[in-house]
Image (cartoon, rainbow, N blue to C red):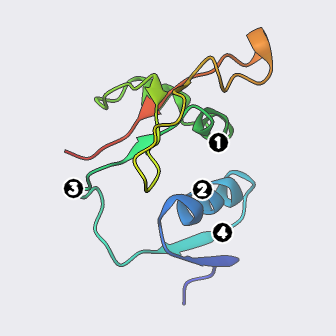
Amino acid sequence: MISTDVIVIGGGPAGSTVSTLLAQHGVKVMLFERERFPRFHIGESLIPETYWVLERLKMLDKMKKSHFVKKYSVQFVNASGKLSAPFTSTTTNRTSARRPGRSFAASST
């Protein structure tokens, strides 16, 4: 019989994040996901605010070394076609030099 402290169902952003954080604190985690990874998926982008989650997960070095295209801004379009102001890594920077804004893109091609 396998012993575990926590079972997580779903390996998407929330499931993989909580599983990683718990495991980093010594919790025995079993993560179940029905899809095979990595998988082809269009439209995977991470806006600058995800920098802090990646930092907490100790994933920044891996992301910086990845083959993913780096994106340094994002702009949104609403249902009527109106464009938002562009969001860049500098517009989302909350605490100046201590935590410089960053942007990473993630896509499986």
**Residues at circles 1 and 4 in contact by the CB criterion of under 8 Å:** no
Cα distance in 3D space between marks 2 and 4: 14 Å
Q: Does residue 19 appear left or right of residue 66 in this picture?
A: right
Disc 4 secondary structure class: loop
Using the rendered view, name the quadrant where residue 6 is placed. bottom right
- How far from the left and from the top, in percent, is residue 79? 43, 56
**Residue 96 falls left or right of residue 3:** right
Is disc 2 in contact with disc 3, using a CB cutoff of under 8 Å?
no
- Residue 31 horizontal/vertical position (percent): 51, 72
- Front position in the image: 27 or 16: 16
Query: Residue tagged by mark 2?
Result: 17
Q: Which of marks 4 and 3 is nearer the N terminus?
A: 4
**Residue at 31% from the left image edge and 32% from the top image edge:** 68
Percent x, y for residue 7?
A: 61, 79
- Mark 1 or 4 closer to N-term? 4
Q: Which residue lies furthest to the bottom in this view?
A: 1
Q: Vertically, is 81 above or below 65?
A: below
Q: How far is disc 4 from disc 3 in space, using C-alphas?
A: 29 Å
Q: Residues within 10 Å of mark 1 (few under 14, many from 20)?
A: few
Label for residue 53?
Answer: 1
Left or right of 9? Residue 91 is right
Residue depth check, mark 2 versus mark 4: number of the one nearer the observer = 2
The residue tagged with tag 3: helix, strand or loop? loop
When the figure is inspected, residue 18 is found, relative to residue 97, above or below; the finding is below
Dot in front, 2 or 3:
3
Name which residue type carries label 2: Thr
Which one is in front in this view, the residue at disc 4 or the one at disc 3?
A: 3
